[in-house]
Amino acid sequence: MTTGQRGSSHSAYKTLDDASLNSKHWLTVITAGMGFFTDAYDLFIIGTVTAILTPIWHLTTAQLSLLNSISLIAAVVGALTFGKLMDMFGRKAVYGIEVMLLVLGAVASAFSPNFAVLFAFRILVGIGVGGDYATSAVITSEYANRKNRGRLVGTVFAMQGFGLLAGPAVAAILLGAGVSHALAWRLMLGLGAIPAASVIYLRRKIKETPRYTLAVKGDVAATIETAAWVTGSTPAVRANGSTPASLAAEGRSNGDSGSGGATGATIRKLHYRLTDSPFLLRLFGTAGTWFLMDIAFYGNSVSSPLILKALQPKATLLDNVLIAGAIFAVFAVPGYWMAVFLMDKMGRKRIQWQGFLVMALAFGAIAVIPGMAKNPWAFLVVFGISYFFIEFGPNETTFVYPSEIFPTSIRGAGDGISAAGGKTGAFLGALLVPTLLKTIHLSGVMGVMAGVSAIGLLLTIVALPEPMGRNLEDASGESIESVAMKTDPQAVAH
């Protein structure tokens, strides 16, 4: 790419990149973030639900593992599907459908009469979760300004922390109040529909992102309109001598988004493939590190009741639920927000590799130090530290990275494949940990997690660039030629 090409792509979104943080940015974050609250709640409450259902439905170890993990492999399908659909039809066209699936799946799961039915509806929940992963990061990133992009996308994902807290809190309230186990698990699953339902309207009404309208559809008029909505200043577009007013007017009158939304605009749309250099290496880095991180994160989190039971065999289910909640509150939630506040100061790459490093050290310590896996206090402190650096580390950054380092036309697919890689790792972790606890015991499981984290550290260093402080086009290597946009103080959107 030539210097001139880069310059044109820089100027194309200057109004968006240089905008101050404002209410429209936070509206996008809230719209996306409530989905992630639901995703976390739905994915992690199942560990407590299966602990309750095991004696009621006489679940085998295989059935328990399948219920704990099926939503995660279904999320692979959701992420791949929604990621591709976003690039084909636009972000707006599919956004909101994924939370509809979450609502339907949560309600139907709560009324399941047996293992087979619950298994089927957990697949539906998983497809919705995967769709949310693929869409929310990309939409937030394409609306964000340059200075705060990491913070905004990271905040969406940090809502997962509140979902992690909500699960144990709801379980503790129901179990502590003496609600029968036969009713409690149904309430735990059904309540997941509420936060997802709250944002269906907002998601269906969101405007198409200005980067998609210009880079993929070539619709100058729609780009002007949305950029003005976000920033409060209408961009002035100059292309082949056309004025901003004429471009917008022609775009509205002819409705021809395929020709640029304005006949006077000439936009050269470059075509990219994920198999091209450097995108293939980046994809290997984003999908691979997300895969490795989720083996550790979901393996430990979904199976936390089993891990804590192995640590304290005589503890009650309520005791272990409260301990899991305390770990999330004391270690995980602060880690999420530390990553959010430092994402645009320390950079994605450093936060990710140092997180993997501390995870490897913490899990390794539990695995090799004699007695560590049998001493509840020592285990919980070191295990908690690993949780802090998972969140102040790769759990946040693997979500942010793929929304930044692929061009707009393949960003949805790149993000979807990356998320699918993560959820494949999550599936394997949740599926295998219950069996591994019985075969190689707690210290052996922690040894496996240490090795996984060490590989993630190396892959981060080798495969991933640093996008901090760069606009999306620069960070992704994308070029949009022949269109220049700058703030026009005389033209304000109404």
Image (cartoon, rainbow, N blue to C red):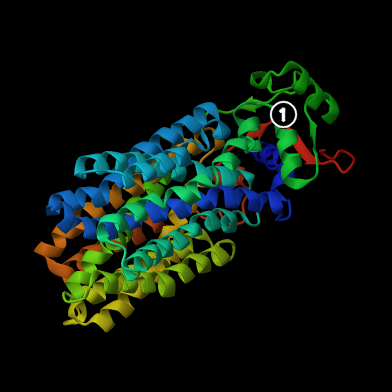
- Judged left or right of residue 178, residue 283 is right
Does residue 221 appear in this view? yes
Determine the residue positioned at 20% across, 44% down: 115
Q: Residue furthest right?
A: 490
Most distant residue in the left direction = 439
Q: Is residue 239 above or below residue 478?
A: above
Label 1: how many Cα within 10 Å (few below 14, some 14–19, many 20+): many
Viewer-nearest residue: 147 or 77: 77
In this view, the residue in front, 81 or 52, is 52
Q: Is residue 211 above or below residue 198?
A: above
**Residue 14 vs residue 249: left or right?**
left
Residue at x 62% of width, y 26% of height? 217
Give x and y (percent) for residue 190: 38, 50
Q: Position of residue 299 (x, y in %)?
A: 27, 59
Secondary structure, mark 1, is helix
**Is 64 left or right of 141, judged from the image as shown?**
left
- Position of the N terminus by quadrant: top right
Q: Which residue is mark 1?
A: 220
Q: Residue at x 65, y 26 (%)?
A: 218
Question: Can you tell which quarter of the image residue 105 is in?
Answer: top left
Q: Is residue 181 above or below residue 268?
A: below
- Residue at image point 49% right, 51% down: 195
Residue 412 screen position, x and y as percent: 49, 37
- Numbered-mark total: 1
- In which image quadrant can residue 302 be found? bottom left
| Residue 288 horizontal/vertical position (percent) | 34, 49
**The one of 42 and 383 positioned closer to us in this rendering:** 42
Tell me if I can see residue 295 in this picture: no
Label 1 is placed on what type of residue?
Answer: Val
